[in-house]
Image (tube, helix red, strand yellow):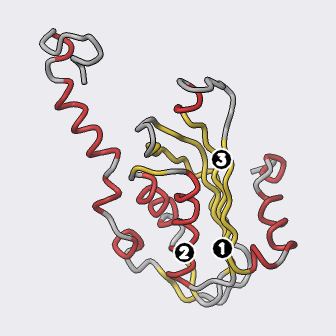
Amino acid sequence: MLGELGENPDRDGLRRTPQRVARAFRELTRGYEMDAATVLNNALFEVSYDEMVIVRDIEVFSLCEHHLLPFFGKVHVAYLPREKVIGLSKIPRLVDMFARRLQIQERLTNQIAATIQETINPVGVGVVIEARHLCMVMRGVEKQHSSAVTSAMLGAFRENSQTREEFLSLLSPRSTQGL
């Protein structure tokens, strides 16, 4: 690849670049070596709690499967427990597991929601991802301030507009004033 770009792969700064890139890509795609059961590590707790649980502003970094360029942003996850809750730190770990694979934002959103639904069978799950894609910022249309927003709404979040609206309203910056 370095030769195709017109570079000299033997010059001082590039000699070890192939090894560094290979190491970086192994790290950036380590999610392929992980599975949800291991990530969640039985951090599922029976609790009598039926109000919304939200973990918001989870930083996410992934690689676009079309261009191998990064996309990054924030993930917001909510669910309405039925009988079990997930340890709060496990939700960002689950996000990372799926994000550390070659991805598209739409699939990433659905994978997070479906895994939570399958794992604890809540009344509903909502996931929203807001991300900037370097394949749109650095190349192609080159729109510096563009972002993509995707959502997956399952169960009560899809069927009940009040539940969905409560979740979405809690994502607004005004809902965190005073924290």
Q: Residues within 10 Å of mark 2 (few under 14, many from 20)?
A: many
* Residue hosting label 1: 125
Q: Earlier in the sequence, mark 1 or mark 2?
A: 2
- Relative to 16, residue 178 above or below: below
Label 2: element kind: helix
Which mark, by number, is residue 130? 3
Q: In the visual, does 56 lie left or right of 32?
A: right
Query: x, y (%) of residue 38?
Result: 34, 72
Res. 81 image quadrant: bottom right
Q: CA distance from mark 1 to mark 3?
A: 17 Å
Give whichever of 22, 60 is nearer the camera: 22
Q: Earlier in the sequence, mark 3 or mark 2?
A: 2
Q: In the visual, does 136 lie left or right of 69?
A: right
Query: x, y (%) of residue 138?
Result: 54, 24
Q: CA distance from mark 3 to mark 2?
A: 19 Å
Which mark, by number, is residue 116? 2
